[in-house]
Image (cartoon, coloured by chain):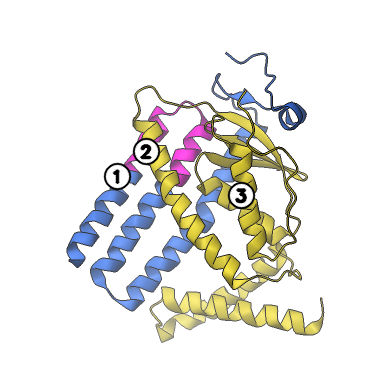
Amino acid sequence: MNEIITAVLLVLGSLFSFVAALGMLRLPDTVIRMHAATKAGTLGAGLILIGEAFFYAELGIALRALAAIAFLLLTAPVAAHLIGRAAYYSGVKLWQKTWIDQLAERYISGGYSDPDHK
Amino acid sequence: MDRSMSLTWLISRIIVYTVTWWVLTKGAGDSWPVGIPAVLAAIYIDFNLFRPENTGWSLGGLIAFVLFFLKSSVYSGIDVVRRVYDPRLPLDPAMVEYPLRLTSSAARNLFICTVSLLPGTLSTAIEGHKLVIHALDVGRPVVHELNIIENRVAAVFKHPVLINNFKTGESKK
């Protein structure tokens, strides 16, 4: 039974990790790629770690897996934020279909006003 | 901050970092010559990065937050899978400025990190009291979802009830 759970978790984890990598190739700009890397990447690695903990069914290993997951959850968004921030401030070109939001108009009228939007 | 507060802060940090080291090294006794300086360094960095604040926190709020986070985190991964595999690449991204309602830095940090791991949103930059968020799909009620996350974070830190500063159920375009 444990082995089935382990297998399912490992396969699911690999699938999410694969999607994170595929997203890097398919998605159109830096910031959008960071979505795939943080969300799918963290979930993939997390599932693999949980699978490992299930396989060994040992308190020490489970605690280390949990610690590793905690560190992943703490570091992945920070890394994504810094890369996104660097891209944002250095003026890396966004995908041409990106809406550039105007705060005032959005919250008052709920409208977008980017004339360059295609 | 009074003396008993700072003592509580110090003791809680010592416990957290010592236990973390102990778990990571499988409790190996001969690792402590490295472990003790590492724990001290962690406490020093912690103190300098996040000045101890008078923020309380609630266990119920934390449990509710963790459950909400795990559920949304899985949904967030599936959402990415769906978008990446779809040959049409269903994206309608936007840069959105979101005025932060949380005031304490601990709560803000938690909110900003959570935003990046939940479906369709990534915190990109912080400009004063505004968070610049990149959203994958503006067809979703992004601002409403951010409101919900922020309220959950507020509940963890016993923040006073936040008042929505914009319309919910926003309309698209």
Residue A15 numbered tag: 1
Residue B102 placement (x, y as % from top left): 73, 54
**Which quarter of the figure has residue A87?**
top right
Image quadrant holding the C terminus of chain B, namely: top right
Circle 2 chain: B
What residue is drawn where x is 60% and y is 70%? B42
Neighbour class for label 2 at 10 Å: few (<14), some, many (≥20)?
many
Q: Is residue A93 magenta?
A: no
Distance of label 2 from label 1 (alpha carbons): 9 Å
Q: CA distance from mark 1 to mark 3?
A: 29 Å
Residue under disc 2 on the same chain as residue under disc 1:
no
Q: Are marks 1 and 3 in contact (CB under 8 Å)?
A: no
Secondary structure under badge 1? helix
For numbered disc 3, what is the local secondary structure?
helix
Camera-nearest residue between B6 and B47: B6
- Location of residue B126 by image quarter: top right
Q: Quadrant of the N terminus of chain B?
A: bottom right
Q: Please, is residue A54 above or below residue B173 in the view?
A: below
From which residue to which does the magenta span run?
A: A17-39
Q: Which chain is blue?
A: A
Residue B148, labelled with which disc? 3
Q: Please, which chain is the residue tagged with disc 1 on?
A: A
Q: Which residue is depicted at the point 63% across and 64% down?
A: B156
Confirm whether circles 2 and 3 share one chain.
Answer: yes
Labelled disc at residue B81: 2
Magenta stretch encompasses residue A32: yes
Chain coloured yellow here: B
